Amino acid sequence: MTVALPSVTDVESAAARLGEKVRHTPTMVLHADETGLPARVVLKLELLQHTGSFKARGALNSVLSLDPRTPDVTAASGGNHGAAAAWAARRAGMRADVFVPGTSTPAKLDRIREYGANLHLVGGDVGDALEACRAFADSRGLPVIHPYDTWETVCGAGTLGLEIGAQVPDAELVLLGCGGGGLYAGVAAALADTAVVQPVETELCPHLHAAVAAGEPVWHPSKGVAADALGPPQVGRLGFDTAVSRGTSSVLVTDEAVVEARRFLWQRLRVLAEPAACAALASLLSGAVTPRRGSTGVVVVSGGNNPAVP
Amino acid sequence: MTVALPSVTDVESAAARLGEKVRHTPTMVLHADETGLPARVVLKLELLQHTGSFKARGALNSVLSLDPRTPDVTAASGGNHGAAAAWAARRAGMRADVFVPGTSTPAKLDRIREYGANLHLVGGDVGDALEACRAFADSRGLPVIHPYDTWETVCGAGTLGLEIGAQVPDAELVLLGCGGGGLYAGVAAALADTAVVQPVETELCPHLHAAVAAGEPVWHPSKGVAADALGPPQVGRLGFDTAVSRGTSSVLVTDEAVVEARRFLWQRLRVLAEPAACAALASLLSGAVTPRRGSTGVVVVSGGNNPAVP
């Protein structure tokens, strides 16, 4: 069974709803002598987004799609979506109850609190947090803002793809990290007719990869440097069906390649991305993906919620 | 006595010389509810420049203005210009001897070495380093790439102003940190007819301020969080005459305001700027400068050469 997937028109509706409430983040061209690649590489600096990651787009689109009289929303997340949901709820004049697993980093927890949310620390992984969140929401009749696998989340995330289309109209390849698959599904919808959108996972968080191999979303452990942001219990239906409908899967990179790409971003650009946000660049720098000679590729740097705070 | 100052045409010549060899760095709009200001604030993210600061522009313009058969160049700098000169020399196929004072941060020294320069550690301040550099250069007949007070350095730095003019055509105020005054002189030349360019110094590095008060460049100690990048022995003649010709001086901010602005950039945008690069934003956030209601102001975030390396 496959589900209906958003079209570019659906993503455009989300973009109209979000307007200037999310940042239109800038791009940067890397020179060929920096990457050693025969293609033009453009970075989409989405870590500059509100709350420090692309998650703000999907969370705010979800919240703004609710009845505006909704008093309170709930969310569960390893961290970035939690901060995004808290920020989006405050932006819409609502309260948020956010459920996070014990694996979240202290910096991410602080940020969720800063945005005024009620923080619920749950033992276990993000799946346990989502379960606790659902029970809480059901008992109070509140909506759950899903981190990646709803229409509103995916269309909101897809607005990043529309910006890429406008900023880099000649992009033929767009590389992005894939956790639950919401960003992938949204950007693939936004750029369906213009670019190949390639999801990248780490070898230690291969959720889409395992799902494609199994023929359906399956549980897989999440380990390594990117686990806090690429660690859903399993890939979402919308992300999975996006890959299946295109006959593709994720590219896998090692944790070492991620760490190397993160160092590259700091050394060359003074961009301090979080590890998960470096998987896409790692696929290029490590040679896991080779862009066509003379082509233009876009690499999404999707978040900067590092533990390091000055 | 005043010196001739560059015109916008001179800066345009430098831009033509540099072409795509320097990055055209992106801008980002801050929302009014983030700054609490009645004006639109646009950040010019120059810390994404090669070598992590705007210094790459002036250094490369200087090097490319030399006879291409020049085998070696020299430079003296507290750090950012040293890295920029080393990078520029390598880019042009030359070697560089770089003289730095003992006050430089280890991260900046590492970077100069990385770009392949011969590093000469000199005791004392940047004035002592410049003196040692001149003696070395004179004895070998080599050119000195000045950090801020030559025509080529100023015109190179000014190319940042041309980019601002193209990216934010409605900018009526441009705020930037001022050390030796090269960035100020260059950007003021580039935007002479379109915007007020306001230099900002810290209270502990008030070189332009002291010069305007004295009627000429004078020595002043450099202390506090920005001393490694806003600490010339004295402001340059080109920067000083630019201020005098416009009947203006620098705005002063406290070190505390700089630290607060730096934290703001990290918390809101995941931009990790170095302290000196936050003086301009500090002038806005602390209320030292109040932009006209409804206007657009640009804040240059000029460097990101922090000690913190992931």
Image (tube, coloured by chain):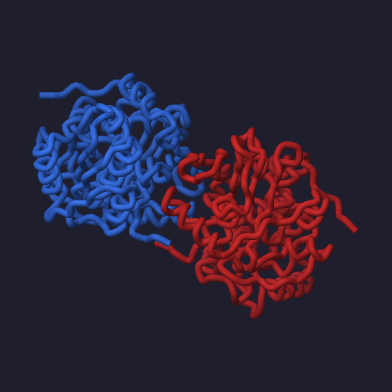
Chain colours: A blue, B red
**Residue under the image location 10 percent in, 44 percent down:** A131
**Count of residue discs:** 0
Q: Percent position (x, y) of residue A27?
A: 47, 39
**Residue under the image location 37 percent in, 50 percent down:** A304
User: For residue A186, which quarter of the picture?
Assistant: top left
**Residue under the image location 22 percent in, 38 percent down:** A73
Horizontal side of A61 relative to B271 (left or right) equals left
Q: Percent position (x, y) of residue B41?
A: 55, 42
Q: Looking at this view, is B106 or A303 the one in front?
A: A303
Q: Percent position (x, y) of residue B130?
A: 72, 71
Rendered position, B52 above or below A190: below
Horizontal side of A231 relative to B130 (left or right) equals left
Rendered position, A266 above or below A211: below
Q: Looking at this view, is B1 or B140 the one in front?
A: B1
User: For residue B69, which quarter of the picture?
Assistant: bottom right
Horizontal side of A24 relative to A140 (left or right) equals right
Q: Which residue extends farthest bottom?
A: B123
Horizontal side of A259 relative to A242 (left or right) equals right
Q: Is residue B278 visible?
A: yes
